[in-house]
Image: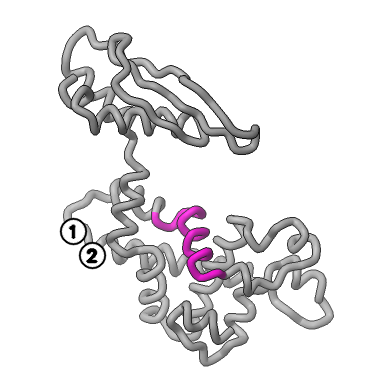
């Protein structure tokens, strides 16, 4: 636990809170006689603490953004994927208490379990050290400007932006076509080309056709052809 506390940058006064945050319901159910609590209640509280800190940070940082934009940015910053990335940065999976079934099923690396545990840890820090301690941890893991910028780039709808750009000139036709795919069924990579009037102006790849189309549109927007369309 000392190593995890170092990664968190926070030393608990009541380590029982951290222990509870790392206790999955499968483990608590298998050890009912020991009076253990799962991290589900802490996860519930942590979700609210995270939402408040994120909203407060974005409200202060972006003084002119409307509510809709603030909501979308917050949702992207605190989504399961972002929490999963934070958990991996902390190597949180190493410290989880899991039941035999979850252990055998790869629970230590499962995104949903790690994301929930991260929220539970936020709640544990909040209960142990107050909102300032929780704010410091959450801000470092999820709300730094660099991370927000990266999330914002991922959030952009390049297909819509490209379509709006193309529509500025009459008689322009934009289409997408699958150029190839590779890899096993559970982890395919798709390659998509975007065409303007039957001429290829961008190419992208992704683990879904939708993602590949977005990357193709991004490629088109960043190249000279797309900008001059």
C-alpha distance separating marks 2 and 1: 6 Å
Vertical arrangement, residue 184 with respect to residue 150, above or below: above
Instruction: Determine contact: label 2, label 1, CB under 8 Å.
Output: yes
User: SS at mark 2?
Assistant: helix
Q: Position of residue 68 (x, y in %)?
A: 30, 46
Number of other residues with Cα within 10 Å of mark 2, as a class: few under 14, some 14 to 19, many 20 or more: few
Q: Position of residue 186 (x, y in %)?
A: 64, 37
Vertical arrangement, residue 25 with respect to residue 170, above or below: below
The answer to which quarter of the image holds residue 1 is bottom right
Mark number, residue 63: 1
User: SS at mark 1?
Assistant: loop
Vertical arrangement, residue 86 with respect to residue 28, above or below: above
Q: Nearer the viewer, residue 196 or 67?
A: 196
Range shown magenta? 77-91
The residue depicted at 30 percent of the width and 13 percent of the height is 199
Residue that carries the numbered disc 2 in the rendered image: 60
Q: Position of residue 73 (x, y in %)?
A: 34, 51
Q: Main secondary structure of the magenta part?
A: helix
């Amino acid at each position: 636990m000392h190593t995890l506390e170092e990664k968190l940058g926070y030393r608990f006064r009541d380590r029982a809170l951290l222990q509870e945050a790392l206790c999955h319901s499968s483990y608590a159910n298998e050890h009912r006689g020991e009076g253990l609590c799962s991290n589900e209640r802490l996860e519930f509280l942590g979700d609210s603490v995270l939402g408040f800190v994120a909203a407060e940070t974005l409200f202060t940082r972006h003084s002119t953004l409307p509510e809709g934009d603030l909501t979308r940015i917050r949702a992207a910053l605190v989504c399961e994927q972002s929490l999963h990335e934070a958990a991996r940065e902390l190597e949180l999976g190493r410290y989880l208490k899991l039941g035999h079934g979850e252990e055998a099923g790869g629970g230590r690396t499962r995104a949903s379990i790690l994301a929930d545990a991260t929220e539970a840890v936020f709640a544990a820090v909040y209960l142990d050290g107050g909102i300032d301690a929780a704010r410091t941890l959450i801000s470092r893991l999820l709300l730094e400007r660099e991370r927000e910028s990266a999330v914002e780039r991922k959030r952009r709808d390049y297909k819509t932006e490209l379509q709006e750009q193309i529509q500025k000139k009459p008689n322009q036709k934009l289409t997408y076509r699958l150029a190839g795919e590779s890899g096993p069924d559970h982890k395919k990579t798709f390659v998509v080309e975007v065409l303007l009037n039957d001429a290829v102006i961008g190419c992208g790849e992704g683990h879904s056709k939708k993602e590949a189309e977005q990357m193709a549109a991004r490629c088109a927007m960043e190249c000279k052809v797309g900008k001059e369309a």
